[in-house]
Structure formats: C-alpha cells, structure tokens
Image (spheres, grey):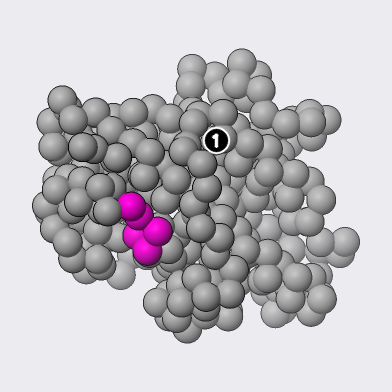
Amino acid sequence: MKPFSRLLLVAIISTNSPFLLAWGADGHRVVGDLALDRLSAPARRALFKITGTSNRPEIIEWCIWPDAYRSTDEGAWTAPLHFVNIPPQADGYDSARDCDGGLCVTEAIGQFAAELGNAALPAQQRLEAFGFVCHFVADLSQPLHAGFENDRGGNDFLITYNGQQQNLHRFWDSTLILQHAYRWEWLSKVVGRTYAPNPGKPWTQDMTVDWTNDAHGIAATLAYPESPVISQAFEARSWSLVQWQLAKGGRNLAEVLNTVLDEP
C-alpha cells in the first residue's frame, strides 16, 4: 500500500462529504476516544510517537480515514476488509470459508496490528496501520459487520423508520446515533461512564475471532426487527445495544493497542 497522505486526512476532516455524517464517523470517534482513555502509559507514549502528536482529536480522526481511503482508486482493494459475511446456517466464523485470501475484517485486524507493533517499519506505515486497527476494531463491534452473507450484512434488508425507508445496516451503522446523540463527545462520555468495561487480558488473534462470533451472534438474535416497520420497543432496545457495542469496541481497541504498543 502506498503511503496515505496527511493532506488527505486534512481533507477528510474539513469536507462535508457523506461518510462524515455517518459506526459512521461518530461511532468510530467514540470507539477511538474510549480506547484512548484506557491506554497504558507505554502504549500512550508509543501512540503519540507514531502519530506525531498528543492532540486527542487529531489522533481520533485517523480512525475515520479508512472509509474515505476505500472510496479512492488506490484504496478500493480495502473494501472487503470492513466486514465479514457468514452464511445463515453457520454457527460462527470460519476463516477458510468466510475470509477468502484473508480479505475480511477479522483477519485485517491481526494484519495491521502486527504492522502497528513492528518498530522496524516506516513511521508512515505504522501510522496508517493504527488508522486501520482503530477503524476495523470498531467495525467489528457493529453486529451487521459480521452479519449474513445472503443479505450482505443487512444492506439488502429494507426497513421503515420514522416514516422513511432505509436498509437495516444503515439503521445500525449511523441512524440510531444520529437520532439519539447530538454530539459524539457527549455520547462518548455517556458510554464511558455507564457502559464501558476496562481492558482485560492481553490481546491475541483468537480474541478477534471471539469478537467476530459475538457480533455475529447478536446479528442472529437481536439485530433484526420482527416487522419491517421499526417499533419504539425495538428502537429503544437497539439503542441500548448500540451503546454497549461501542463500549466493547473501545475496550477491544485498548486491548489491541496496549498489547502491540507495550514498548520498553
């Protein structure tokens, strides 16, 4: 992958393009923000060195750029890395069946975590790896990013919410956050105070498989409404679940960063 320009990051921050409105951008910011609060001192120092800044908002914005990068000709190859589709009849993730060539979110987290933790790599490559890790860990906490193959993670499942038709994936990705949280900073504080668990044991790739199966289990049991018209009860339950999943995303990201950036 060619170096990702800091100028493009600036463009992402300043533009009003659609991907900023939408785990849409605010969800990714919340996950990044929660993780920063839970970094060990060595991991924090290493991340400041890699990003070249201790400015929190600037660091968090790197968690967004993979969505913009995949929309470029150069980054189009990364599109499959944002999700994993699992057959409806399957109990859980199978790398040979569900991740052809390693091109899925589950395997991408391990790949870029290894790059992020490799001090011998160029600084720019490690910076981009941080952006990918931050983004993909958050993606995997959104249940439909580990959803079903037959409806492309809810993208082909149409619902009606507040009188407007949209797909279920969008409902989970951004609609609920935009409906209930007027600022991502507020949402991060609420989630961090009410839901967010602290990091646990050191991260391994096996844990990423567990996260995949957890998200897929939620997709199978809780993510789909009984009726295409979203009820108030389903909305309320889903909003609580969104907050809990954001909290788990922040914890999971902190576990990855604390493990791979635990430099002497």
Q: Is residue 112 within the magenta segment?
A: no
Q: Quadrant of the C terminus?
A: top left
Q: Amino acid at mark 1?
A: Thr
Q: Which residues are magenta?
A: 36-40
Residue drawn at the location 59% of the way across and 45% of the way down: 145
> In which quadrant of the rendered view does residue 209 lie?
top right
Q: Is residue 104 above or below residue 254?
A: above
Residue name at image x 38 percent, y 48 percent: 134
Q: Residues within 10 Å of mark 1 (few under 14, many from 20)?
A: many
| Residue 99 x %, y % | 56, 24
Q: Is residue 202 visible?
A: yes
- Within the image, what quadrant is residue 207 found in? top right
The answer to whether 233 appears left or right of 195 in the picture is right
Point out the image quarter for the N terminus: top left
Q: Position of residue 90 (x, y in %)?
A: 79, 29
Residue depicted at x 63% and y 55%: 169
Where is 254 relative to 132, above or below?
Answer: below
Q: Secondary structure at mark 1?
A: helix
Q: Residue 136: x percent and y percent?
A: 45, 44
Q: Nearer the viewer, residue 234 or 255?
A: 255
Residue 214: percent from left, percent from top: 68, 43
| Residue lying at 56% horizontally and 60% vertically, measured from the top left | 197
